[in-house]
Image: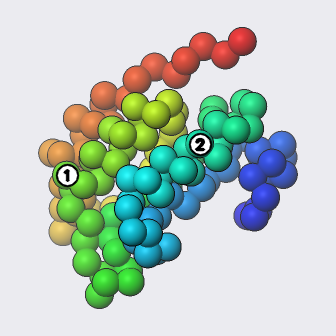
Amino acid sequence: YSQALENSIARYDFTAVMAMPYMERAADPAAFCHDLVNAVNDRPGAMKKVVFELQSVDWRDENRPVSSRELADAIRSLYGMGVQHVGYYPDALFSDHPDAGVMKPVLDGKPNAPETR
């Protein structure tokens, strides 16, 4: 709802950041997400209030599904950079995309949030 991260985290309990490299036609999806994490980390207290929203479909490439492994690797990488909250969409339940068998272990493996001072 907000284009200014500072305003959004000041006013809301949680703010979703669209971490969608394919929508942005990013040359390097991993670097794109890394840059987003750094931008959030630059704002004190923001990491605990930001949800990194990933895409499971590349709408700019004929609705090509992003592989479940790639999505799981992206989530694992975000967790490794200190991200506490992730989400993805769409979740095509009836066509099993992303594959729940691939996604469940990575989501279950979410590290505990670091203690805040």
How many angstroms separate mark 2 from mark 1 (CA)?
24 Å
Give the class, few, some or many, for how many residues have Cα within 10 Å of label 2's Cα (few <14, many ≥20).
Answer: few
Give the class, few, some or many, for how many residues have Cα within 10 Å of label 1's Cα (few <14, many ≥20).
Answer: some
Is residue 38 visible in this depiction of the protein? yes
Q: Position of residue 41 (x, y in %)?
A: 64, 37
Query: In the image, which disc is placed on residue 38?
Result: 2
Amino acid tagged 2: Asn
Q: Which residue is mark 1?
A: 69
Task: Name the secondary structure under disc 1.
Answer: helix
Amino acid tagged 1: Arg
Q: Residue furthest bottom?
A: 62
Task: Give above or below for 60 relative to 79.
Answer: below
Q: Position of residue 83 (x, y in %)?
A: 50, 36
Tag 2 near tag 1, CB within 8 Å: no
Residue at left offset 50%, top offset 30%: 82
Residue at left offset 56%, top offset 51%: 36
Q: How is the image coloured?
A: rainbow
Q: Quadrant of the N terminus?
A: bottom right
Query: In the image, which disc is placed on residue 58?
Result: none
Task: Give above or below for 21 relative to 12.
Answer: below
The answer to which image quadrant residue 111 occupies is top left
Residue at left offset 36%, top offset 40%: 77
